Image: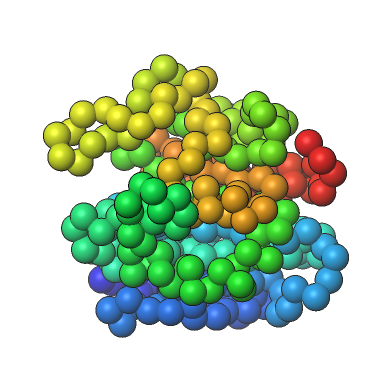
């Protein structure tokens, strides 16, 4: 519990220093889910991007990567783009170092594709309730920082309007490749909780492209966000390297969206 208190104290402190704006989206068991914004309103034409982390409580590098990026960000970047962050989607899981706040209540599913029969978690329902706020904040791009704690290789899920991975996917993949020796390839990337068997999509050269699974990133893409990416850093590496990788991915994500702009891909 002390870790999340210290983390949020740091978020509040940096937000005050850098003049970020904070908004509570809702709470689960007394723990609030916070939105951090670089600007107080979205009534402008600058690119808008949303970065989230902490869907799964044991995946620590993502939230700390956001914290590191906020500490080191420069005003020049903030003048170019409207950035928003949800540093911890699942604060109960983070506090308890557990994947889900309630065992078996999956945090990142049930947002779309009702034919899958999945139901949104309490955290997910808070995101759904706030979608009219969140969708415009991701108008130009969405990034979700995840980890695969079983792996020593990285991979990513990406969504682009093209039929095959484009410059956005390639750029994020190359950025992760600067921090980790290899990309996962040719294997299933999901585990069946009932028996531990490998299921789900097969990753190809570090990339799972346009995988429709009812996740938040899948939903954001269906809602019209032009580019979305989920990074899966390898949890068998040291935490510091994973944090550094996440912070550099945020920089690359911003740069790629600025470069690609709103032109058709």
Query: Hey, which quadrant is residue 81 in on the image?
Result: bottom right
Where does the image place residue 43, in percent across and percent down from the top left? 80, 75
> What residue do we see at 66% from left, 59% from top?
138
**Residue 104, visible in the rendered structure:** yes
Q: Residue furthest front?
A: 115
> What residue do we see at 84% from left, 44% from top?
263
- Image quarter where the C terminus lies is top right
**Residue 236, visible in the rendered structure:** no
Q: Residue furthest left?
A: 195
Above or below residue 30? Residue 215 is above
- Image quarter where the N terminus lies is bottom left
- Camera-side residue of 153 and 264: 264
- Camera-side residue of 162 and 74: 162
> What residue do we see at 49% from left, 21% from top?
204
Q: Is residue 122 left or right of residue 173?
A: left
Where does the image place residue 258, in percent across and percent down from the top left? 79, 48
Q: Is residue 146 left or right of residue 96?
A: right
Where does the image place residue 74, in percent across and percent down from the top left? 73, 61
Above or below residue 121? Residue 251 is above
> What residue do we see at 20% from left, 41% from top?
193
Q: Is residue 225 left or right of residue 52?
A: right
Where does the image place residue 78, in percent across and percent down from the top left? 75, 64
Q: Tell me how many marks there are.
A: 0
Query: Hey, which quadrant is residue 99 in on the image?
Result: bottom left
State the colouring used for the structure image.
Answer: rainbow
């Amino acid at each position: 519990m002390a870790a999340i208190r210290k983390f949020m104290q740091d978020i509040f402190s940096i937000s005050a220093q850098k003049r970020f704006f904070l908004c509570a989206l809702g709470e689960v068991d007394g723990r609030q889910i916070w939105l951090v914004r670089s600007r107080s309103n979205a009534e402008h034409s600058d690119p808008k991007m949303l970065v989230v982390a902490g869907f799964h409580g044991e995946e620590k590098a993502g939230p700390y990567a956001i914290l590191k990026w906020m500490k080191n960000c420069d005003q020049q970047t903030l003048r170019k783009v409207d950035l928003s962050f949800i540093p911890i989607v699942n604060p109960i899981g983070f506090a308890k170092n557990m994947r889900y706040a309630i065992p078996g209540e999956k945090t990142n599913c049930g947002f779309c594709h009702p034919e899958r029969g999945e139901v949104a978690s309490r955290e997910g329902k808070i995101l759904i309730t706030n979608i009219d706020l969140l969708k415009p904040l991701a108008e130009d791009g969405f990034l979700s920082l995840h980890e695969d704690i079983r792996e020593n290789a990285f991979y990513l899920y990406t969504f682009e309007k093209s039929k095959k991975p484009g410059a956005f996917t390639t750029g994020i993949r190359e950025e992760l490749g600067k921090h980790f020796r290899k990309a996962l390839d040719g294997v299933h990337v999901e585990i069946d909780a009932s028996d531990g068997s490998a299921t789900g999509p097969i990753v190809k050269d570090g990339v799972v492209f346009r995988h429709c699974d009812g996740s938040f990133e899948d939903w954001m893409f269906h809602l019209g966000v032009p580019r979305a990416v989920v990074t899966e850093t390898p949890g068998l590496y040291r935490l510091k390297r994973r944090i550094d990788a996440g912070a550099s991915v945020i920089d690359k994500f911003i740069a790629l969206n600025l470069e690609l702009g709103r032109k058709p891909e």
